[in-house]
Amino acid sequence: MPAADTIPRRILDQARRRPASHAYFAKQAGVWRPTTWRHYVDEIRTAARALIALGLPRGGKVAILGFNRPEWVIFDHAAMMAGGVPAGIYTTCSAEEVQYIVHHCEAHVVLVEDLGQWKKIAAQKSNLPLLRHVVTMKGCPPIDDPMVLSWEAFLAKAAPIRKLLRMARSYRTRSPAEQQRHRARSLVGHGQVGHAVAVEVADDHVAGIRPGDEVLPGSEGR
């Protein structure tokens, strides 16, 4: 039986086929530094284990509140690899809008970029009964709240986790059709009036699957 073509499987395949190629670049001290596909997948796997350690169930939701950063994409793909569903939130949303989206998508964990985005969560904590953990991106100052984990503390949660292997075995026992119907992500859109609207999209629709597609091309030759 052929393997299902899902977002996590495409990333793993890319790392296997092009492990030393560049997956992304991030600016550090004014210099754009590359990360290989091999290392990128290691980052995703570690974050996926950490999410499982925090109690994210299969089909559980997470939200991401921040600008375009490596942690954003790592967390996004890690949620899918752990069997969860990620939802991005515009950085320009007010505290009330953030509360509505986080609660509406039933997020257990939220990744925030900085203190400014954390303050939106903090102002609405009493209205977020499902939220259990908040993770901050690299460079965010320490936050004195039992709900909050730094990026480094979050990743450290992955060390003792072995459930991921059992989850992966369970995932492989599902039929390709079932795997492709996995809800890859929640897309939160803002209409002209009223609240934001969340739509869950299956893996096959996100992937735009076609035989022979190359996934997320690296940057060889740059």
Image (spheres, grey):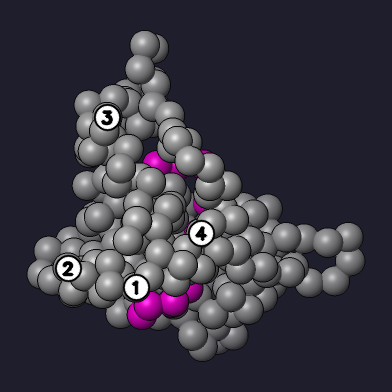
- Tell whether label 1 touches label 2 (CB within 8 Å): no
Q: Residues within 10 Å of mark 3 (few under 14, many from 20)?
A: some
Q: Amino acid at mark 1?
A: Arg
Q: Amino acid at mark 3?
A: Arg
- Which residue position is annotated with label 4? 203
Q: Identify the image quadrant of the C terminus.
A: top left
- Which residue position is annotated with label 2? 165
Question: Is 146 or 26 nearer to us in this picture?
Answer: 26
Write the residue at 36% across / 80% down. Answer: 57
Write the residue at 42% across / 53% down. Answer: 5
Viewer-side label of 3, 1: 1
Please report whichever mark, 4 or 2, sits nearer to the chain's N-terminal start: 2
- Which residue position is annotated with label 3? 18
Q: Residues within 10 Å of mark 1 (few under 14, many from 20)?
A: few
Question: Is 131 or 73 nearer to us in this picture?
Answer: 73
Q: Residues within 10 Å of mark 2 (few under 14, many from 20)?
A: few
Q: Identify the image quadrant of the N terminus.
A: bottom left
Please report whichever mark, 1 or 4, sits nearer to the chain's N-terminal start: 1
Question: Is 204 or 197 nearer to us in this picture?
Answer: 204
Residue 9 is a magenta residue? no
In the rendered structure, the answer to whether residue 13 lies left or right of residue 165 reads right
Please report whichever mark, 3 or 4, sits nearer to the chain's N-terminal start: 3
The quadrant holding residue 20 is top left
Cα separation, mark 2 vs mark 1, equals: 15 Å
